Image (cartoon, rainbow, N blue to C red):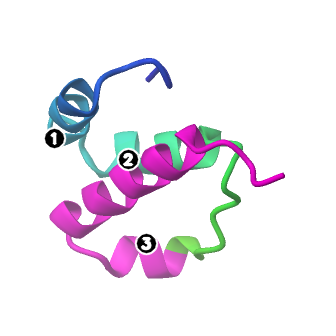
Amino acid sequence: MSTNESIDELIRDVQTMDRDGCMTQLRQIGRPRIDFTDEFLNSLSLDRLRHVVVAAFLQSRKRPAR
């Protein structure tokens, strides 16, 4: 996924991901640092996990405060 995607495209892409795809994307996001254990992420429903992925991507797009 690209940080240049529109929010609609991002949501559409994440909606098609399975659990493994979501976990892969979370591991590839450099910022913000995701501090969830795999055990916790695996306990989430797939829909909730997708929400975490979308939130992480939206946060990664924000510029750091100066």
Front position in the image: 57 or 34: 57
Front position in the image: 11 or 28: 11
Q: Give the residue type that dot 2 points to.
A: Cys
Q: Quadrant of the N terminus?
A: top left
Mark 2 crowd level (few <14, some 14–19, many ≥20, 10 Å Cα):
many
The picture quadrant where one finds residue 46 is: bottom left
On the image, the x and y values in percent for residue 34 come to 63, 63
Residue 56 left/right relative to 11: right
Mark 3 crowd level (few <14, some 14–19, many ≥20, 10 Å Cα):
some
On the image, the x and y values in percent for residue 7 come to 27, 33
For the point 39% across and 72% down, which residue is it? 42
Q: Is 23 placed above or below 40 here?
A: above
Q: In the rendered structure, find residue 29 and report the number of the disc placed on it.
A: none
Viewer-nearest of discs 3 and 1: 1
Local secondary structure at mark 1: helix
Point out the tag, 3 or 1, that comes first from the N-terminus: 1
Q: Give the residue type that dot 3 points to.
A: Leu
Question: Magenta stretch?
Answer: 39-66
How far apart are labels 3 and 1 at the CA level? 17 Å
Residue under label 3 = 41
Residue under label 1 = 15
For the point 38% across and 47% down, which residue is it? 22
On the image, the x and y values in percent for residue 6 come to 29, 24
Circle 3/circle 1 CB separation < 8 Å = no
Local secondary structure at mark 3: helix
Q: In the rendered structure, find residue 22 and report the number of the disc placed on it.
A: 2
How far apart are labels 3 and 2 at the CA level? 10 Å
Local secondary structure at mark 2: helix
Q: Give the residue type that dot 1 points to.
A: Gln
Mark 1 crowd level (few <14, some 14–19, many ≥20, 10 Å Cα):
some
How far apart are labels 1 and 2 at the CA level? 10 Å
The picture quadrant where one finds residue 4 is: top left
